[in-house]
Amino acid sequence: MIAALQRRWRHWQARRTPPVATLELDRRHIFIMPNRVGAAFVLTLLLMLLAAINYQNSLAYALVFLLGSVFVVAILHTFRNLAGLRVSGVAAGSVFVGEQARFVLRLESLHRAHQAVGAGWAPARMQRVDIDAGHVLELELDLPSERRGWLVAPRLCIDSSFPLGLLRAWTWVDPGQRVLVYPQPLEGELPSLAARLHDNEEEGLRAFGQGVDDYQGLKEYQPGDSWRRLHWKAWSRGGALLVKDFAEIKGRDLNLDFVALGGDVEQRLSRLCYWVLRLTREQQAFSLQLPGQAIATASGDPHCERCLRALALYGGGP
C-alpha cells in the first residue's frame, strides 16, 4: 500500500515537472512541506495550545499565535526562495568508461537573490549555493560512467529550507542532459585487417602490411590479443602465456579491424579505442572497420571523434 502511494506520488510530481531544456520555477513546479524540524515545531505548538486551553492562560495563547504566524510567514518566504529561479542544462563533454561524467547545471536569478539552494541527485550529495540577484551560477555535478554509450542524467532535485529551516521547498528538473561514454582504452597489439586475411601470419604481414615489420620478440599476453600470435610452445612447457611482438611500419595508412582482434566485444572495442587515440596523437592516417560499418581513411581530431563515437555506439550499447 505504501509503495503504491509512493509510486503515485512520484508519478504526480513527474507530471508537474516534465522534461524541458530550460525551466523557470513557479507555483506549478514547487512543492513545500514541513521537514522534521518543522513537524516537531508544529507538534510543540499543538501541545502549547492544549496547555493554554487547559489553564486559560492569555500569555500562552499569545505565544502560540505568534509562533504560528511566524510559521505561516516562513511558508511564503521558503517558497519565494525558489520561485523565479531559472534552471537549464549545459552541454557536457565526452568521457571514457571509468571516468566521472560531468553535467553542468546553470542557475540564473531573475528578480531576487536565492540563498542556500541545493541541487543534486541524492540528498546526501546536494551542493548548496547562493545566487545573487541578476547573476548566473554554474554547478558541476558528477556521475560515474560504468558503460559505454549514452549516459543520460536522471532528474535533478532542487530544494531549499531557507530562511528558518522549518519547511522544505523542492522541485524536480530534467534538462535532458546526456554524455557520450567512449570505451576504456586498452593497450595491446595493432588490430589490422591482415591478421585475418591469411592463416600464415608472416606471409600475411608481408603481403598486406598489418602494421608490423620485423619480429621483435615476445611479450606478456593481454586480454584481447590475437590467438594467432600466441607462443604455444612456451606455454606448453609451463611458462607464462606470451604473444609475438612486431615492430610497427611508419608512414603507412592502417586499417583498424574489429574482426582481427581476439576477446569479447568490449575488449575489442577498448583495444580499437586505444589505437584510435594513439594514431591520432602520432598524426597517422587510418581507417576503422566494424561489422556493418566502415570509416574511410583520414586523420585529425574530427576523424578521431567520429571513430570514437562509432566505437561508443557500436551495437546500440552493451
Image: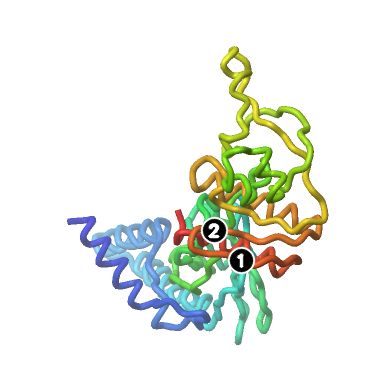
Considering every residue shown, the one lying at the far left of the view is 1
Where residue 241 appears, as percent x and y from the top left, is: 61, 24
User: What label sits on residue 261 in the rendered view?
Assistant: none
* Amino acid of disc 1: Ile
Nearest the eye: 36 or 55 = 36
Residue at image location 43% in from the left, 66% down from the top:
167
Q: Is residue 136 left or right of residue 61?
A: right
Instruction: Point out the tag, 2 or 1, that comes first from the N-terminus.
Output: 2
Nearest the eye: 66 or 279 = 279
User: Does 132 sit above or below residue 127?
Assistant: below
Where on the picture, by quarter, is residue 86? bottom right
Query: Are discs 2 and 1 less than 8 Å apart at CB?
Result: yes
Residue at image location 72% in from the left, 48% down from the top:
211
Disc 1 target residue: 295
Disc 2 target residue: 290
User: Does 243 sit above or below residue 240?
Assistant: below
